[in-house]
Image (cartoon, helix red, strand yellow):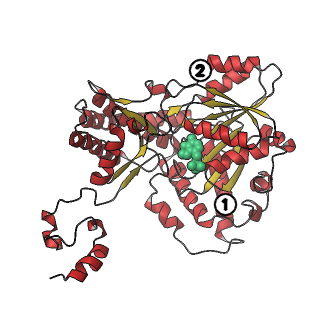
């Protein structure tokens, strides 16, 4: 029925998922394809890498619109509402600036606004992103001191206290920390860092990278005493990359008055308080702003931030439970041993013998699931990262875990049993506990200051 031309030129377009089929082989028609070694990855793919994350259809639809006049109409009101809602998301009453940028851009924005060449900053390192951040600031001419706490244990408050106490001249202008270090999946205890800084009576600013935590892990800028919060659109906020968010305190604003690194593009003054046209230092990223409007409505007004945190917590525990079972009597393990130090949006795991890379490749080829590569870990092929951030639910997670188990079976990776059943149990148990849990979190999340009412 299908001629040779049709088989080569048309069928692959009509059925792109079958492009791996050899169209010169004997089995060629759709009717016969069932006898071909079929792909199990056809269907909706699941990109489970720690950013960019899955974008909800609603957010995609909100962005799907023609260009609009950027000087009047909806966009002006939308941008104003976004500023108020970013404050609710970050838990701050202070300043909000937005950039057409990724996370790296927000690192540069903060440095440009706050520092002069030669200023000293302390970067707390618990993985690859802090190293990159430190490197960026070095290249800008700052005197960057790094304190490396390894990739497994997290930040030692005793060591931080010593570092700050030793700085008698108070020459350290800022302490920089990744709230969630996406490479190791360590989560820093920000209130404890603030407490150590206060106990040392140190005047440094506290700058927090929440690029991988905002909208996943609990974060509260003002109550936790954070001076500058950096974030980006493509992870917990469920958007494409391209929007950088920088929130800054009055103390940070005062520090910016003397910064000699400041350039017009990065200057946060007009971005925070200027006329609408100056908020983006030029044409605003209209479609992204409509997308952010939709995602913040979903997070803050529909699901509610406490419930979003709770969902991430429960799904993270579901993933951890599966790993606990797999790791019994085998060489599969979660990288971070202490649950209290683990991120809720990403889990780094080790499969010794280079099996992580093999498993990732198998999953992509046979199930449509893509996991994150091991970043900054050695040996690289032993590590992978399971992302569980943003727009995801129980069935995506359970499907992902079952797919991983299928991969381990197919590749002969030794693993303990019962993981999928145990993970299902975590979800099942959470449905009874959920209403009380959300109630508890909601109480805890009562606005502590005016202007943050939901
Ligand atoms: C914690 C953290 N900081 C910074 C970045 C850099 O962000 P971007 O890739 O958007 O520049 C990332 C990216 O994954 C990250 O996870």
**Number of marks drawn:** 2
Query: Mark 2 sits on what residue?
Result: 156
Residue 411 horizontal/vertical position (percent): 24, 41
Quarter of image, res 225: top right
Residue ranking furthest to the front? 24
Query: Residue at 16% of width from left, 67% of height from top?
Result: 33
Query: Mark 1 sits on what residue?
Result: 79
The response on whether ligand 1 sits within 8 Å of label 1 is no
Query: Residue at 72% of width from left, 39% of height from top?
Result: 138
Q: Earlier in the sequence, mark 1 or mark 2?
A: 1
Q: Give the alpha-carbon distance from disc 1 to disc 2, as whole Å.
A: 40 Å
Residue 94 visible in the shown view: no
Residue 399 horizontal/vertical position (percent): 29, 46
Question: Which SS class for mark 1?
Answer: helix
Above or below, 22 against 145 in this view is below
The response on whether ligand 1 sits within 8 Å of label 2 is no
Above or below, 65 against 114 in this view is below
Give the image quadrant in which the ligand numbered 1 is located: top right
């Amino acid at each position: 029925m299908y001629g040779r031309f049709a088989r080569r030129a048309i069928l692959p377009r009509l059925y792109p998922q079958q492009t791996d089929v050899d169209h010169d082989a004997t089995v060629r028609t759709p009717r016969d394809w069932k006898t071909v070694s079929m792909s199990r990855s056809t269907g909706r793919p699941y990109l489970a890498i720690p950013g960019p994350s899955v974008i909800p259809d609603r957010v995609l639809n909100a962005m799907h619109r023609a260009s609009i006049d950027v000087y009047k109409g909806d966009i002006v009101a939308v941008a104003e509402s976004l500023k108020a809602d970013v404050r609710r998301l970050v838990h701050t009453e202070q300043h909000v600036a937005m950039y057409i940028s990724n996370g790296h851009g927000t690192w540069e924005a903060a440095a440009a606004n706050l520092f002069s060449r030669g200023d000293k900053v302390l970067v707390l390192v618990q993985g690859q992103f802090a190293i990159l951040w430190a490197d960026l600031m070095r290249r800008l001419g700052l005197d960057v001191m790094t304190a490396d706490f390894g990739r497994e244990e997290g930040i030692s408050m005793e060591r931080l206290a010593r570092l700050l106490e030793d700085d008698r001249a108070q020459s350290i202008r800022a302490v920089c920390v990744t709230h969630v270090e996406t490479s190791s999946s360590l989560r820093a205890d920000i209130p404890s860092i603030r407490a150590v800084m206060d106990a040392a009576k140190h005047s440094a600013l506290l700058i927090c990278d929440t690029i991988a935590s905002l909208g996943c892990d609990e974060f509260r800028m003002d109550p936790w005493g954070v001076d500058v919060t950096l974030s980006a659109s493509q992870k917990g906020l469920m958007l494409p990359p391209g929007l950088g968010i920088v929130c800054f305190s009055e103390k940070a604003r005062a520090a910016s008055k003397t910064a000699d690194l400041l350039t017009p593009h990065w200057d946060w003054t007009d971005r925070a308080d200027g006329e609408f046209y100056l908020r983006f230092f030029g044409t605003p990223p209209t479609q992204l702003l409509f997308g952010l409007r939709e995602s913040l409505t979903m997070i803050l007004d529909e699901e509610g931030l406490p419930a979003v945190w709770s969902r991430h917590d429960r799904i993270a525990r579901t993933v951890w439970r599966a790993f606990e079972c797999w790791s019994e009597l085998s060489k599969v393990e979660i990288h971070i041993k202490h649950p209290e130090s683990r991120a809720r949006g990403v889990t780094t795991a080790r499969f010794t013998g280079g099996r992580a890379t093999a498993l990732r490749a198998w999953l992509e080829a046979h199930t449509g699931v893509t996991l994150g590569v091991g970043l900054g870990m050695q040996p690289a092929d032993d590590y992978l990262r399971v992302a569980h951030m943003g727009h995801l639910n129980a069935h995506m997670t359970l499907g992902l875990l079952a797919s991983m188990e299928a991969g381990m079976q197919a590749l002969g990776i030794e693993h303990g049993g019962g993981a999928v059943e145990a993970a299902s149990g975590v979800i099942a148990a959470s449905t009874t506990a959920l209403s009380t849990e959300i109630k508890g979190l909601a109480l805890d999340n009562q606005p502590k200051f005016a202007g943050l009412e939901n």
